[in-house]
Amino acid sequence: MLKKNPSDEFEIKEINSKYTIIILIIIVLLSALFRLWDLRNNPKWYGDEIGYINSALSLITGKLSLGAVKWIFLIPWPSPPFYNIVNGVLLLFKRDILILRLFCAFLGVITTVIIYLIGKEFLNKRVGLISSFVFAIYPLAININRRVFPHNLAMLFITLAFYFCLVYRRTKDKNLLFLIGIICALASLTTYWVVGLFIFVYMFFFFVDRKQLKIVFLLSISLIVIFFLWLFLQYREYFLSDIKGMMRLASGSRDKNFITYILQNYYNFFNIDYFIAAGIIGLLFAPKLENRIIIIGLFLSLSFEIFRQRENIPVFFYPAIILVPVLALGIGIMISRISYFITKLTKRQITDIVVTFIIIPFLPFAYNDFRQCSSGFVTKMDYWAIQNHIDLEETAIFVNANVKEEDFVLASSNLWWLVKCNSADLVQSAAQNGITSDFIPVPLDKNRFIFDCDYKKAKYLIIDNLVRRWMISQNGVIDILHNIETEGWKKVFERGEYVVYANPLIFKEKEQNIIIGNPYIYSVLGKKYFDLKLYDNALLEFKKCLAIVPNDEITHLNIAITYHVKGDKENAIREYKRTLEINPSNKEAIANLKSLGVELQLKGE
């Protein structure tokens, strides 16, 4: 009788269940830490995040417009309704980017768990733990999961659909057909980038259980068919034109041969970092031909649709986030298989020791995560990002203090969600005259505009980096800016990258000067800085207000409270006393002076 080789037990030997749960909890906590730490401020706000906020607000308010253009989920912002509905509901609680970033970060944490389940189902618990750990610490995944992108929700749907496909392969449980179909249907209403998921699911059932393909097919396309049918019936005059524009956007702009273009994009993606390279190579390590076909088929079906359209993934990585769980699984498979071969070669059960040593090269990712979470993420997208969101919010405060609801301002979409009047950008202003651009690739009918966004009707023009670095290259924009310069629009406000110009046709010179010296602006900005615990900035704004209104009781009190919180007792007492000189019965000033140990005597002491 042959003796049993200890190494033969490797395939069936699993990690102790108790340790598995403990390790998984640690991984999930690590994933949550990296995705939630200082989430509102880090990374820098990006224009597309604001775009999804604008589209969500448009949906829940029933306006169905973006800027001045009536929007039907296609041109100028291709975004299906499901993600926008979810965002809109969340924004009802609080109109803040943090709410939506929390949701996307939560999606990343949940995906960490699903990846473990996929690895466990695909091979074993060890693969699941390694894969989920790698996903939890991968900096690009963390960065995208911290942003308001629908691709994060698509990523979750894709991992769920893949997991249930694997479970169906093993169990043939027909209840899973409904789940898979509905998940695909919801994914189709989340982002238009999920065509690859449909291709994979159909091919999977074609080979695994062809009889059920019809059920999955009908369920998966049900919602998107109903959605497009509704769009056609409701907005027939816009629908065909927008579909034509969408097809132009989807085709991309390629000077190279199509095959060369695709291969170049795959090559550039492979060279982003060693995580991606290792993940792609790891897919080849999957044991059994059937498993290799499944995992490589998933990667190719998802990636082809991305690289068919986008050659800038190394810079704008977020569409590729749907590939990261697959690549994390590839790394998990590769590490597990290498440890298996080493264990078999040495004839010793040293799998976990080998796994630990192989994982070491990935630990710098974790160190980099800690560093970037604390000091700020640095990405290739930063050039196009909002450099300081406080400057953005301050500019909106200025605009809101000087406009009425019926007024109109020209600004990039970064400001639309914050200003309390009609707003449009320079591209839309040009489009009103039939000019096309990157995101409005077809001429728009005049009745597509919900208000007249001719630049001459704007009360203000706000210039920011989005205008300087991208919008200025669009057709017609440079002509508008040239006209504005010629007509002598005057700068009335500036914060960081944001410069506000007033329309001389609307404002008189005297009114412009009054706007510049509006004390309300500085008071509001001071309070905002105070809430952010930026006390020196708050004092600076309060003092600007005081320079315009020297004996304002509230401003002196605000300055006193700021000094008090800073621990500057001497200046706090001085400002509290000045507050009482203006109003001797100010209860807050009296109470705070007593808390500082000051005995109040006669007025004017």
Image (cartoon, helix red, strand yellow):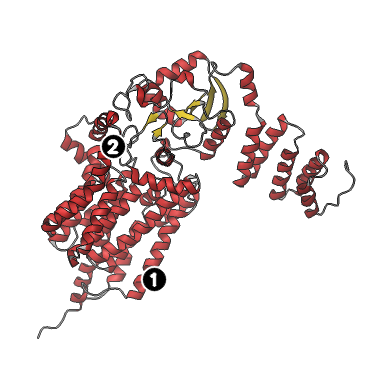
Is residue 42 in view? Answer: no
Could you tell me which residue is drawn at 77 percent across and 34 percent down? 551
Residue carrying label 2: 231
Instruction: Assign the C terminus to one quadrant of the image.
Output: top right
Toward the front, the furthest residue is 233
Toward the bottom, the furthest residue is 1
Amino acid type at mark 2: Leu
- Vertical relation: 30 (above or below) 42: below
Q: Quadrant of residue 384?
A: top left
N-terminal of the pair, mark 2 or mark 1, is: 1
Which mark lies nearer to you, 2 or 1? Answer: 2
Toward the right, the furthest residue is 602
Q: Label 2: how many residues lie within 10 Å, few (<14), some (14-19) or many (20+)?
A: some
Residue carrying label 1: 22
Q: Is residue 496 left or right of residue 244?
A: right
Q: Position of residue 472 (x, y in %)?
A: 40, 24
- Which structural element holds mark 2? helix
Task: Measure the C-alpha gap from mark 2 to mark 1.
Answer: 49 Å
